[in-house]
Amino acid sequence: MAFKFVAFAALVAVARAGVIAPAAPLGYAAPAPLAYAAAPAAPVLAKAAVAVDTDYDPNPSYNYAYDIQDSLTGDAKSQQESRQGDVVQGSYSLVEPDGSRRTVEYTADPVNGFNAVVHKDAPAVAVKAVAAPVVAKVAAPLAYAAPAPLAYSAPTLIH
């Protein structure tokens, strides 16, 4: 600790002697004073610029659909959707892990909001029965005897 103090004291002495030029002090610029202008006598009305979206469609419409049937992985799903103005109608379906097919039909419009109806169809393929797991019979556990408690005797001194 004494070495650090001596080194610091030596550094201060060298700086005071002018060998090391002191760094320029950090400056602080005072903010410019606020200028207030007198209020105009009459309000000035300016025409505001209005940005016009050239891609805006007042009556949007589209149709969209896909269908996937992958026999290798068993992935089967589809979706279709259409829009006319503010009304959207569509449905999607997928195969659940239990083999059943879930189908969701939906509509959305400004008056009724989003509404969906879900249907679930029975599995297309019967689920194979799985045999009950085989349980091996295990012999009864071996008997366990607790160890005998250790006896303690005071040490004897031999002369």
Image (cartoon, rainbow, N blue to C red):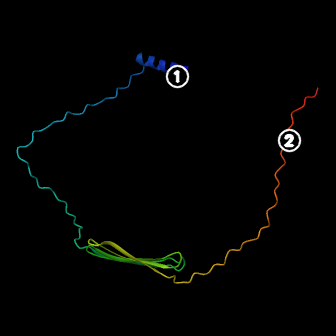
The percent position of residue 50, horizontal first and vertical second, equals 17, 59
Total marks drawn?
A: 2
Q: Is residue 64 visible?
A: no
The percent position of residue 72, horizontal first and vertical second, equals 54, 78
Residue displayed at 22% across by 71% down: 58
Q: Nearer the viewer, mark 1 or mark 2?
A: 2
Report the residue marked by disc 2: 151
Density class for disc 1 (Cα within 10 Å; few <14, some 14-19, many ≥20) is few
For the residue pair 73 and 140, the one nearer the viewer reads as 140
Residue displayed at 87% across by 36% down: 153
Is 34 on the left-hand or right-hand side of 29?
A: left
Give the amino acid at mark 2: Ala
Determine the image quadrant of residue 118: bottom left
Give the amino acid at mark 1: Lys
Report the residue marked by disc 1: 4
Cα separation, mark 1 vs mark 2, equals 62 Å
For the residue pair 75 and 16, the one nearer the viewer reads as 75
State the SS at label 1. Answer: helix
Residue displayed at 81% across by 56% down: 144
Is 11 on the left-hand or right-hand side of 86?
A: right
N-terminal of the pair, mark 1 or mark 2, is 1
- Which quadrant is home to the C terminus? top right
